[in-house]
Amino acid sequence: MSRYPYNISCKTFVGRVILRNRCLCAGLACLVMVMLGRTQGTDPNNVGAAKVIEISAKKYEFTPNEIRVKKGDRIQLKIHSVDVTHGAKLDVYPQGSKDKSTPGLKFAEPDQNGKVEKNVDQVLEFVAVAAGTYEIKCAKLCGMGHGRMKAKLIVEE
């Protein structure tokens, strides 16, 4: 009598278990991606006018390099490149956050975060839903100092 269910061999049993686990993992990954897409793309229930903040980008700095906003504010960042093509990409989780389940910044159009077009000002609109410090990085390789081109968005309670 076999130790495995349905009177099958060990090799067949292990193969079925591995296949089942792969299917479960793939299904779980799809569910997580759908849920993240829903929370990123939905319009947060903040109907107030956006606070417009203009940022200029030039080799190798953002001006201003520190921006302070209040939690719950709807923000519109307008990034203008002064010299060469630059762009901004904001981390959606605060620095030092171990919880990656809910982003602290909810974008109206998540695909615009980090998107760069030549000779076009970048506009990022989001709601600051969690307090913390968020890093802003240059999204377009702009030269030797590209890695140092950073700014901070500080969301206060």
Image (spheres, helix red, strand yellow):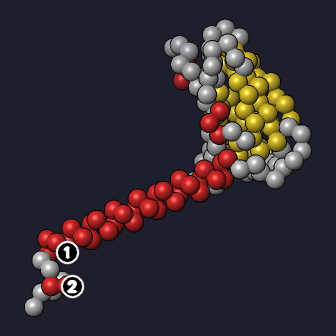
User: Are circles 1 and 2 on residues that touch, CB within 8 Å?
Assistant: yes
Q: Viewer-proximal residue, 7 or 21? A: 7
Q: Viewer-proximal residue, 108 or 153? A: 108
Q: Position of residue 113 (x, y in %)?
A: 64, 34
Q: Residue furthest top?
A: 83
Q: Position of residue 10 (x, y in %)?
A: 14, 75
Q: Which residue is mark 1?
A: 13
Q: Position of residue 114 (x, y in %)?
A: 61, 30
Who comes first in sequence, dot 1 or dot 2? Answer: 2
Q: Secondary structure at mark 2?
A: helix
Please determine whether, in this image, residue 75 is positioned above or below residue 33: above
Q: Is residue 127 left or right of residue 138?
A: right
Residue at figure coordinates x 32%, y 68% from the top left: 20
Q: Secondary structure at mark 1?
A: helix
The type of residue carrying mark 1 is Phe
Q: Is residue 26 left or right of residue 129?
A: left
**Picture quarter containing residue 12?**
bottom left
Bin the neighbour count of mark 1 within 10 Å (Cα to Cα): few under 14, some 14-19, many 20 and up.
Answer: some
Quadrant of the drawing holding the N terminus = bottom left
Instruction: Give the numbered dot on residue 5.
Output: 2
Asked whether residue 98 appears in the rendered view, the answer is no
**Picture quarter containing residue 124?**
top right
Residue at figure coordinates x 63%, y 19% from the top left: 117
Q: Position of residue 93 (x, y in %)?
A: 63, 46
Q: Is residue 26 left or right of residue 45?
A: left
Instruction: Give the numbered dot on residue 29.
Output: none
The type of residue carrying mark 2 is Pro
Q: How many marks?
A: 2
**Picture quarter containing residue 54?**
top right
